[in-house]
Amino acid sequence: MRFSKFFFVFFVFFLLQSCSDKSLYQSKHYVFGTIVDISIYGENEKTAEDTTKAILDEFTRLHNSLHAWKKSDLTNLNDAISKNKSYKNASAELIEILKNAKSFEDDSNHLFNPAIGELIEYWGFHQDEFNAMHPDQSKIKTLVEKSPSLDQLRISGSTIKSINPHVKIDLGGYAKGYALDRANKILHDHHIKNALINIGGNIIAVGQHGNKSWRVGIQDPRGAQAIAKLDLPDGWAIGTSGDYQRYFINDGVRYCHLINPFTGYPAQGVYSVTVLIEPSQNVGTLSDVLSKPLFMSKKEDRPMMAQKLNIHHYLIIEDKRISMTQKMADKIQFLDPSIQKKNQIEITL
């Protein structure tokens, strides 16, 4: 079976007023291989249009710079690494991103590992559409044993080199969140007080929608609608990792794009992990990155990983089981009141 990422958007948001509200400017686009939704409230149309254009120009720049398999600054770096060459004249931005991503890799005990691009490519996820494939256990074992890590990068000034030629950097679990932070800066530079930016389910709220907070929905990972909703206050961000956006099914087994660096196989058993992040300087990046280590963690290790990464609000959906922190439970509202009976809900922290 073949699936295209065009068909999967794992977050929806509920407007608190109808879309005919003249104070609400909305624009939808396709960037980063997903739907981008920009909503600006309470501004004149010209200001909203100019701000939206500035955000989309920045998203396009980042897309062209950080793409994992189409020609970009990142693919140029990966090409140099594969040839045991130094990559010279790297941008200060790229270097800062790699240093920041490395800190997340270290903090997550390497469950978040952007250096495993060879594995991601092997599984067929370095393309816009992907087909079911039969994994070769020996090939996967070999790729895992190469042990690629951002720890193996050596940065001197604007030059990047790797001591491991099998480091292939894929920032798919980082770039959308980073783009949210860049959008947040643009909103403030344009003096926008109320907006909601949604990049394929990674969402950041600025201000509110009228006299109420922005409201977002959490996708049912096995359905077409939202399973729950919550209010997203000013400065907060939310993000989800799921096995239903980029995946294929082979012999009845679902293989998603979220690869465990230690096994070399897509993580299985978890449908989705949602994290809600309090305001911070890099709140967007955190909303993108922090769901991945929880998705990869064993059930018994999740509370410890959440504490290590300072994740206070999370929701994990599995088959007939939902677990979440008490702080998340206090904010979330399931749309089906009977869900408490249909699923075993566990409060973890």
Image (cartoon, helix red, strand yellow):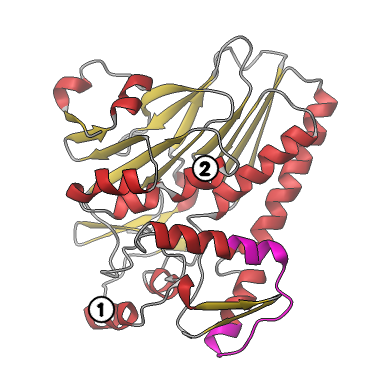
Image quarter (top left, top right, bottom left or bottom right) of the N terminus: bottom left
Q: Is residue 81 left or right of residue 321?
A: right
- The disc labelled 1 sits on which kind of residue? Asp
Q: Is the residue 19 above or below the residue 200 in the image?
A: above
Q: Is residue 95 magenta?
A: yes
Q: Position of residue 122 (x, y in %)?
A: 38, 74
Q: Quadrant of residue 26?
A: top right
Q: Is residue 161 magenta?
A: no
Q: Residue furthest top?
A: 211
Examine the rendering and report whether any part of residue 271 can be seen.
yes
Image quarter (top left, top right, bottom left or bottom right) of the C terminus: top left
Q: Quickly name the residue at label 2.
A: 200
Examine the rendering and report whether any part of residue 72 can be seen.
no
- The disc labelled 2 sits on which kind of residue? Gly
Q: Which residues are magenta?
A: 80-97
Residue nearer the viewer, 17 or 108:
108
Q: Label 1 vs label 2: CA separation?
A: 31 Å
Q: Quickly name the residue at label 1.
A: 136
Q: Position of residue 340 (x, y in %)?
A: 19, 21
Residue nearer the viewer, 87 or 138:
87
Q: Position of residue 223 (x, y in %)?
A: 32, 34
Residue nearer the viewer, 189 or 62:
189
For label 2, the SS is loop
First-in-chain label (1 vs 2): 1
Residue drawn at point x = 48 percent, y = 67 percent: 126
Residue nearer the viewer, 205 or 303:
303
For label 1, the SS is loop
Q: Is residue 169 left or right of residue 196?
A: left
Q: Residues within 10 Å of mark 1 (few under 14, many from 20)?
A: few
